Amino acid sequence: MGKEREKDRILESICRRAEGYTVEETLTEYVIDEEGNRKPVKEKTQNKHYPPDIAAAKAYMELICPEGEFASMTDEELVREKTRLIKELSEYDQSS
C-alpha cells in the first residue's frame, strides 16, 4: 500500500471517528461438548453506536489544515464546524 493511500485511509478513519458511526456486531455464545469441542449455541446481532469524538474532529482538522486555522478553536466552535461539514457532505452525497 502506497504512502498516499495509507494517509488517505488514516484520514478516513479519523473522520469516521469524528463524525460518529454505528456498526453491526454479532455475538456468539459457545458451550463445550463432552469431547471438549466448542459449539455455538446462540447468536445475537446488534447495532453498536459510537458517538462523535471531538478530539478526533480536532485532530482531523489539524491534519487537513496544518496552518493552525482550527487548532485555536474551542470545543464549541469545533462542534459547530463539524456539524456544518457533515451537513455539507450529506448535501454533496445526495446531489451525486
Image (cartoon, rainbow, N blue to C red):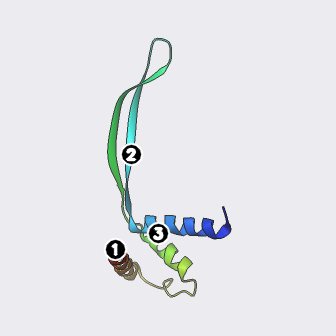
Please tell me which of labels 3 and 2 falls first in the chain: 3
* Kind of residue at badge 1: Ser
Residue at horizontal 37 percent and vertical 75 percent from the top: 96
- For residue 46, the mark is none
x, y percent for residue 5:
61, 67
| Residue 25 against residue 57 in the figure, above or below | above
In depth, the one of 88 and 42 nearer the eye is 88
x, y percent for residue 6:
62, 65
Q: CA distance from mark 2 to mark 1?
A: 25 Å
* Kind of residue at badge 3: Cys
Neighbour tally class for label 1: few under 14, some 14-19, many 20 plus, Cα within 10 Å = few
In the rendered image, which quarter is residue 94 located in? bottom left
Q: CA distance from mark 3 to mark 2?
A: 21 Å
| Residue 63 against residue 72 in the figure, above or below | above
Please tell me which of labels 2 and 1 falls first in the chain: 2
Q: Dot 3 lies on which element? A: helix
x, y percent for residue 11:
53, 69
Please tell me which of labels 3 and 1 falls first in the chain: 3
Q: CA distance from mark 3 to mark 1?
A: 14 Å
| Residue 64 against residue 12 in the figure, above or below | below
- For residue 90, the mark is 1
**Which residue is labeled 2 in the image?**
25
Q: Dot 2 lies on which element? A: strand
In the rendered image, which quarter is residue 83 located in? bottom left
Neighbour tally class for label 2: few under 14, some 14-19, many 20 plus, Cα within 10 Å = few
- For residue 15, the mark is 3
Neighbour tally class for label 3: few under 14, some 14-19, many 20 plus, Cα within 10 Å = many
